[in-house]
Image (tube, rainbow, N blue to C red):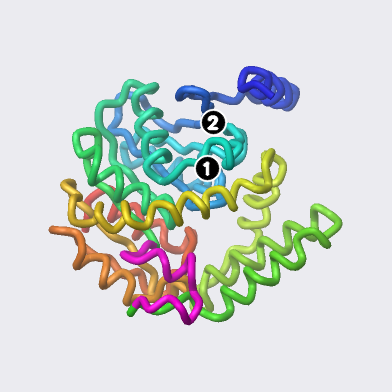
């Protein structure tokens, strides 16, 4: 199916709903994007994690960032949401390709430089942008990442990384989802299954906004065209480990790392090791935050993004 025909289908469905999607074309890839605020304000590019659509940057957070003077951009990675689905066997990609997608968005919007905020896989992409595209990046804010992503990709005993592996609860949940996803019949059951995952990622110490994540997951399911996209992005991460390790020592832009003390994927040690790997980087530990965007931390997040303090 051609990209133009996919665009037509998406445009028709959204027009029917009273909305019009916006796309940027980078070669054969088309990426859905959305902006908030005034075009002339400093650009802030938000990059979401693996398996997540751009709308997982909650609209309320995007709107608050515009009030702080930013022109905010969120988008769907390839293989996510309304963006292109890729035949990974025929056209494999890695995180450098996803980094070039991000630069392509800036090019299409005629933005010379942007501040980049990325969470999880999006934070890894932010480090690649800071290392290999410093002329286009004002600063980066990686959230919930690590200097050794292999601890997530291979949490087995064969992985001899000195950094802690994800907590057993996370790994058990992922295995449960793999076993159950084809057996879950209704949309409501699938939403509940995924919301439970985000509740685990939230960590036990801080209130989890279940209603917000029910809304975000429901929206994501309504926009999902390619359920296998997460598998492709996991493969992209696996093929990028060497490049990611090389990038950390090459980052040439101000770097403000945010890490939650209750992150069940990457414990505090990951953030502490990461800051040592990036020259001049600062680490901001958010007490009680997990591996997600909890509204209780929006004030702290905005402060770091805006002022780097």
Q: Is residue 216 left or right of residue 60?
A: right
Q: Quadrant of residue 191?
A: bottom right
Predominant SS of the magenta segment: loop
The residue beneath circle 1 is 54
Q: Looking at the picture, does residue 130 appear above or below residue 255?
A: above
Relative image position of residue 106 (x, y in whole percent): 35, 28
Q: Helix, strand or loop at disc 1?
A: helix
Of 155 and 262, nearer the camera is 155
Work out how far the residue at label 2 is from the one at label 1, CA to CA, in angstroms.
9 Å
- At mark 2, the secondary structure is strand
Compared with residue 103, is residue 279 higher up or lower down, i.e. above or below? Answer: below
Whether the residues at callouts 2 and 1 have beta carbons within 8 Å, the answer is: yes
Crowd class of label 2 (few under 14; some 14 to 19; many from 20; radius 10 Å):
many
Front in this rendered view, residue 184 or 201: 184
Q: Which residues are magenta?
A: 145-161
Q: Residue 15: x percent and y percent?
A: 70, 21
Q: Residue 275 sits in which quadrant?
A: bottom left
**Residue 32 badge:** 2
Which quadrant is the N terminus positioned in? top right
Question: Magenta stretch containing residue 155, yes or no?
Answer: yes
């Amino acid at each position: 199916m051609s990209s133009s025909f996919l665009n037509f289908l998406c445009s028709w469905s959204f027009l029917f709903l009273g909305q019009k999607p916006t796309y940027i074309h980078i070669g054969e890839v088309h990426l859905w994007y959305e902006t908030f605020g005034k075009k002339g304000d400093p650009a802030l590019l938000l990059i979401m994690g693996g398996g997540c659509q751009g709308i997982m940057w909650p609209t309320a957070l995007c709107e608050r960032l515009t009030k702080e003077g930013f022109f905010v951009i969120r988008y769907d990675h390839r293989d996510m949401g309304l963006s292109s689905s890729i035949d990974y066997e025929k056209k494999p990609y890695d995180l450098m390709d996803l980094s070039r997608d991000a630069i392509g968005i800036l090019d299409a919007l005629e933005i010379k430089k942007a501040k980049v905020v990325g969470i999880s896989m999006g934070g890894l992409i932010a480090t690649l942008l800071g290392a290999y595209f410093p002329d286009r990046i004002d600063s980066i804010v990686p959230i919930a990442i690590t200097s050794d992503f292999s601890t997530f990709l291979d949490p087995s005993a064969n992985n001899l990384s000195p950094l802690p592996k994800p907590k057993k609860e996370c790994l058990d949940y992922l295995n449960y989802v793999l076993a159950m996803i084809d057996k879950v019949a209704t949309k409501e059951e699938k939403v509940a299954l995924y919301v439970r995952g985000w509740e685990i990622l939230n960590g036990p110490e801080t209130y989890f906004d279940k209603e917000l994540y029910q809304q975000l997951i429901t929206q994501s399911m309504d926009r999902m065209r390619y359920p296998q996209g997460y598998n492709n992005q996991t493969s992209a991460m696996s093929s990028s480990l060497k490049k990611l390790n090389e990038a950390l020592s090459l980052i040439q832009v101000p770097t403000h790392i945010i890490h939650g003390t209750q992150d069940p994927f990457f414990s505090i040690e990951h953030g502490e090791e990461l800051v040592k790997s990036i020259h001049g980087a600062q680490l901001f530990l958010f007490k009680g935050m997990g591996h997600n965007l909890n509204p209780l931390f929006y004030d702290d997040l905005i402060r770091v993004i805006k002022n780097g303090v």
